[in-house]
Image (cartoon, helix red, strand yellow):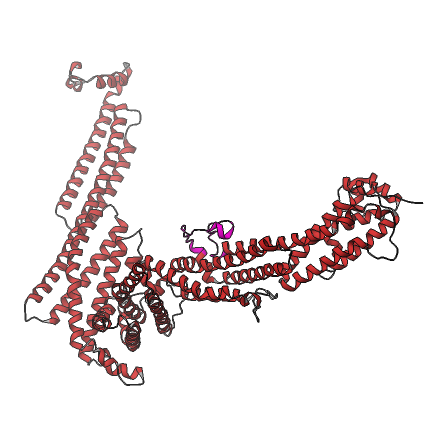
Amino acid sequence: MEWLQTLPPPSNLSPSALSFLDHRFHTQRSLADAPNFASELQTQCSELDRSLTELAQRLGAGLAAYASFSGDIHGLFGDVSDKLTALSSTCSSNVVSDGGRNEGDGKGFREELATLAKEVARLETVRVYAETALKLDTLVGDIEDAVSYTMRKNIRKHSSSQNSHEMHILATKTLKTTEEILTSITKTHPQWKHLVSAVDHRVDRALAILRPQAIADHRALLASLGWPTPLSALTSSHSDARTANQVLNPLLSMQADLKLKYSESFLALCNLQELQRKRKARQLEGRDREVALRQPLWVIEELVNPLSLASQRHFSKWVDKPEFIFTLVYKITRDYVDSMDDLLQPLVDEAKLVGYSCREEWISAMVTSLTTYLAKEIFPSYISQLDEESVTGIQSSARISWLHLIDLMIAFDKRVKSLVENSGILLSFDDDDILQKISSLSVFCDRPDWLDLWAEIELGDALDKLRPDIEDENNWRKKAEGIVLSSCTDDHKSPLVSNAFLRHLASVIDRCRSLPRVTLRSKFLRLAGIPIIRKFFDSILIRCQEAEGLTALTDDDAVIKVTISVNAAHYFESVLKEWSEDIFFLEMGMDGYHEAEFPCDANNYGEGFQESSRRVIFDDEIKKLEEFRTEWVEKISLVILRGFDARTRDYVKNKRQWQKGEEGWTVSKNLIDALDYLQSKMSVVEEGLNGRDFVGVWRSLAAGIDRLIFNGILISNVKFHDSGVERFGSDLDVLFGVFGAWCLRPEGFFPKASEGLKLLKMDENRVQECMSGGKRCLKENGIRHLGVTEAEKIMKNRVFTI
């Protein structure tokens, strides 16, 4: 037992070691296993030492490989990570489960391995970042070298344009590669935003030099080709425009070598623009990308700009003759448009510029140059004339000139639209973006105050033209002939004045259709169109109020005057409803535009118009016309009912007449005058009022007479004998006969009077049954509109004679 003598004294051992030995050798017998236990501990320590040594060696090798920054470091670190994971599993399986010290050491070792694995992953990320940064730095350096070369070329007088073009192509390719890497980084490593920002800053500086140089080279090439053709040559006497274009267009007369140079320059500029588009799309990811994705073609702009400058020298002479300006712009646009399809469109397709039409871009660029000149020179000149007119108060031709200019713009836009549609592109109101690009009226998109001024002038012109039509009484008396609406076949009996209002409203709407955006069309129609409808409403309301104020509608002429206004309102309402089904107006409701500052004249219209419902632009006006018709139809019915009531007062008060018959008369004498009045008034109304509203008049009148008879006779404690019941029935038959001209079962519109007569005609036994049976018994006998109390009151007044 010599090995026991090598043990250190107990004072040199740690408390944990003493505790471990005391736990292991707590009895005398356990000392016999000491050699085996010592051997086992030595084996475990040796294995751990070997594992740690191997781990240190591998880690050192990995760090050395990383320090060399070789291309194989990624594979080496992967191998290290795999072997460390395997080692962790091996070590954890060999740790003694019941040894407190060994178990704690194994857990700590596993934690160290996990930390080490994370550190290895971090180092791998740093390596990839460094490689990417180095690659981007190299690419951007190449770009900057190419830019510097082109700058030095421009400084030297004698330099090879071929070399310059090649450097442009090389720079564009390098830019494309750089953009692909940046796009990949944005998707896979969004946290590297500082690297992306730094590269973007350097690339933007290079592009700020490269693009102007590329455009300058392209302009020089165009000038060498003879572009643009002098405008004087455009006044060719050739009758065939296409033949003239082939002679005058330098792009179609290029020789092979020039054509190749132009194609290369064209493609280079297109590729540079596409690269710029992709960069903006990446930088604006998650935001409004429309501006970045839809930019005019630079190559087309370079064709238009010199033409625009040459044209403006002529435009300055034609401020007072704007028709010449539109004619020249349209001629230039038309003469070159076919060459855009034939020559340039294949080049755009080769450059893989998606969504671009050379025809459309050419027309758009020409229209844009026109609208720019209109906004800078023409409109300010006209507005100054209008301001001078408002200051001096002297009527001038400024407003006429403004409307004439708008007419020219609308006619120009229609001709330009036909040029676009000739290529097979069908435009609709959904294509607001395209319409804005090819419309000279897009000048109002940036100047809503000019749109307000146009609407004011348009409205004033329409109202001035309507004033004589409103004041001419013949336009109110004569009916419009041949009016047919697809939604209604009724005879509206509309006066001519309603057609005059609709004609001017339709004119405003037609002019409004040419505006390129829904919001502009909606605003213009609310400013210039809706007031025309309100003026119409004001006119018919005033006429009705005048008629009511003079005679309270007791005179036939007053009733006819009201019926004319109701007919006009009904026809106007029907037309507005039919128009509202058009997609043109439905889009305005979907757009949700609402002009909050439309004042409502409560004095003229009785009450203010409600706010827009944002469904269809005419909804509020249609509702107001419906309310107008309902109100005045009720007033006509009420006036006739009052006259009928006044003439039946003696008839209703004579309660003794129901106790005996009146021989020789089929109708009571006191009722004859009332029925004659009723028939006379209704014939006047029927002659003057349209069929739909006339139905409302006689139905309302029938309901009123039914209440009058029921309250004044049936439940007024009148004693009905047999002869009185027969007499009452004869009177109702004659009354029903008057209304029988307008319906098949007139008694159905006098429910209480007809059911009261039915109760009076019952025999005594059935009367007793009904009085004891309640509501159920009344329904079984066909009495559905009278309550039990009302029925009992009528039946109590029935006197049966033997």
Q: Which residue lies furthest to the bottom in this view?
A: 238
Image position, residue 625 (x, y; %): 54, 56
Image position, residue 381 (x, y; %): 27, 64
Residue 752 seen in render? no
By secondary structure, the bulk of the magenta-drawn segment is best described as loop
| 593 in the magenta segment | yes
Residue range corresponding to the magenta coloring: 589-618
Q: Please state the total of marks drawn on the protein image.
A: 0
Work out whether residue 357 or residue 122 is closer to the camera in this orientation and state it. Answer: 357
Image position, residue 299 (x, y; %): 23, 69
At x 21%, y 70%, the residue is: 309
Quarter of the image for the N terminus: give it. top left
Looking at the image, residue 565 sits to the left or right of residue 736; the answer is left
| 44 in the magenta segment | no
Work out whether residue 485 or residue 36 is closer to the camera in this orientation and state it. Answer: 485
Residue 789 location, quadrant: top right
At x 12%, y 68%, the residue is: 164
Is 24 above or below relative to 734?
above
Image position, residue 310 (x, y; %): 21, 73
Quarter of the image for the C terminus: give it. top right
Is 788 above or below relative to 506?
above
Residue 542 seen in render? yes
